[in-house]
């Protein structure tokens, strides 16, 4: 009986010690939280938005990207981000804010490009009217 108990404990301990698989590691920060103003280096904020389209092209989904307010093409993100990160410390976070109605593919492609530049990605979220606050 002691041998069976010992084998069960060893099996459970080995299963518990195995690392769990994980996907993209992100940190969520609510956009409405007041952050202290930083003098000098400003944060890198990347916005992924649905671009306004004309009525005749309503079915098309166009993506508009901004880095610190400047509109850029999605193909230019890597170069612009590398230039921005050159003047900041290596562990400087890059904040990503995206429209909630976008397909995840657009957002994940932006995250992949940011990770390729060795950026630490922090996702910003917005409080919507349907979100309730827990006490």
Image (cartoon, helix red, strand yellow):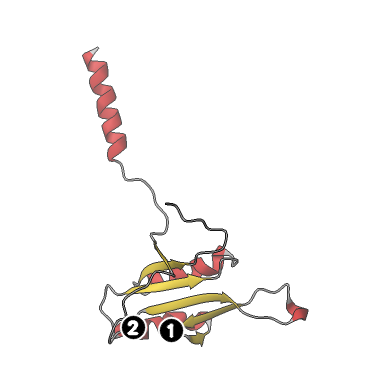
Does residue 99 appear to the left or right of 88 in the view shown?
right
Q: Secondary structure at mark 2?
A: loop
Q: The residue tagged with tag 1: helix, strand or loop?
A: loop
Q: CA distance from mark 2 to mark 1?
A: 9 Å
Q: Is residue 110 above or below residue 104?
A: below
Residue furthest front as drawn: 135
Q: Which mark is residue 7?
A: none
Residue visible at 33% across and 83% down in the picture: 42
In terms of image quadrants, where is residue 116?
bottom left
- What is the residue that sits farthest to the right in this orientation? 56
Looking at marks 2 and 1 on the same chain, the residue that comes earlier in the sequence is marked by 2
**Residue found at x 39% / y 67%:** 122
Q: Which residue is mark 1?
A: 68
Q: Where residue 88 sits: x, y (%)?
A: 28, 82
Q: Which residue is mark 2?
A: 42
Residue 23, horizontal then vertical, whole percent: 42, 55
User: Residues at badges 2 and 1 in contact (C-beta under 8 Å)?
Assistant: yes
Residue at the image position 31 percent from the left and 76 percent from the top: 36
**Closer-to-camera residue (18/103):** 103
Image quadrant in which you'd find residue 19? top left
Q: Is residue 121 above or below residue 131?
A: below
**Percent position (x, y) of residue 63?**
59, 77
Give the residue drawn at x 44%, y 72%: 96
Q: Residues within 10 Å of mark 2 (few under 14, many from 20)?
A: few
Q: Quadrant of residue 92?
A: bottom left
- Label 1 crowd (10 A; few <14 / some 14-19 / many >=20): some
Please count the marks in the image: 2
């Amino acid at each position: 009986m002691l041998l069976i108990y010992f084998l069960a404990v060893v099996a459970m301990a080995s299963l518990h010690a195995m690392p769990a698989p994980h996907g993209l590691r992100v940190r969520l920060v609510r956009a409405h939280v007041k952050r202290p103003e930083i003098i000098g280096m400003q944060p890198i904020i990347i916005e992924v938005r649905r671009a306004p389209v004309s009525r005749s092209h309503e079915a098309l989904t166009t993506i508009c990207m901004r880095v610190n307010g400047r509109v850029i093409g999605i193909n230019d993100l890597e170069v612009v981000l590398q230039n921005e990160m050159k003047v900041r410390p290596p562990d400087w976070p890059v904040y990503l804010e995206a429209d909630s109605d976008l397909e995840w593919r657009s957002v994940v492609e932006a995250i992949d490009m940011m990770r390729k530049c060795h950026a630490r990605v922090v996702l910003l979220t917005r409080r919507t009217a349907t979100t309730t606050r827990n006490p």
